[in-house]
Amino acid sequence: MAERAWQGKTDGTSWMHNGLVSVMRVVPLRLMYGFVALFVVPFYFLFSNGRRPMFHFFRNRLGYAPMKAFCWTYCNFRRFSQIILDRFSMYAGRKFDFDIDNYHLYQDFAAAEPGFLILSAHVGSYESAGYTLVATKKRYNAIVFSGEAESVMRNRQKMFDETNIRMIPVKEDMSHIFLMNSALDNGESVSIPADRVVEGQRTVTCDFFGSPAEFPLGPFVLAAQRDVAVLTIHVMKEAVKKYHIFIEQIQGQGNTIREKAADIARQYVASIETVLRKYPEQWFNYYEFWND
């Protein structure tokens, strides 16, 4: 079984995060990209445990030659650093441009009475969607990792204060499950990352880049049981201050909840694979993801 371990929180202390926000208010973004590429990315590239699984992604899943896989692994670390800087730049009040595919799907569901589910993944910069796809009437509930740094959570909340967004931290007492169901009952939207398995979770196995991989069953069962509309949303970086948001609807088929959940999972995984073939350097799961 592949090892599934990740840190789950942004590196650095609160004062470092707050200092970075202050720096991003005055220092040009390109200059910050260059500084981090010269002095930070090489350190993480050399000493991070994520280098090997990322190399395996490019070498074994995308079929790149060894040297090409090595170069793309470095590009992945550099791109990840840029997206982190973009996040703190947004905290500092800077604006970015977003092209949105199928925006009407999100707008239609946000305007309708029933609740709906959004399935995201650790690709690109999904957090940016929360600052862009704002539903003023229907509350947007974002499931977040409860162990994230307090300073990052505070900055997120500051960004969300002007929008109708509520963060729901994942708790050991499973209280987040009650809040998710309550939100759907109230006709709200719920956003869930559905690409990482934690210990003890039930899983569904899907073909992903030609090899089996495990995904958490819970989000897909929730969608099937509640019979709610499901969207996938991926936010991919294209230029210094430009992102592209891809929105698709999933309509699961099956005679049972389990079959329908499996079909939703299959379509969700296919959506990730499609977007990663366009933006291969924006896969940010830094552990051995596949079962083989």
Image (cartoon, rainbow, N blue to C red):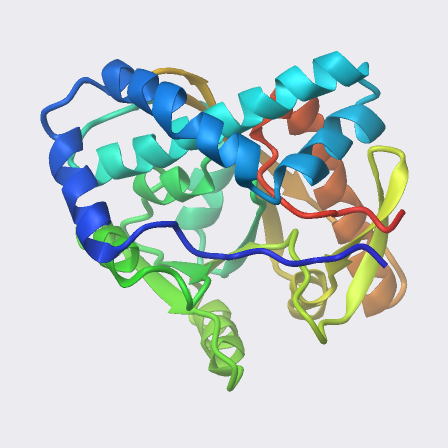
Does 233 appear above or below 55?
Answer: below
Residue 230 lies, in percent from the top left, at 61, 51
Residue 153 lies, in percent from the top left, at 29, 58
Apparent side of residue 32 relative to residue 203 in the rendered image (left or right): left
Quarter placement of the N terminus? bottom right
Residue 223 lies, in percent from the top left, at 66, 62
Does 180 appear above or below 210?
Answer: below
Apparent side of residue 152 relative to residue 268 in the rendered image (left or right): left
Does 88 appear above or below 26?
Answer: below
Name the residue at 57% across, 29% down.
Answer: 282
Residue 39 lies, in percent from the top left, at 36, 25
Q: Nearer the viewer, residue 69 or 166?
A: 69
Q: Is residue 99 visible?
A: no
Does 122 appear above or below 68?
Answer: below
* Residue 88, quarter of the rendered image: top left
Q: Is residue 238 visible?
A: yes
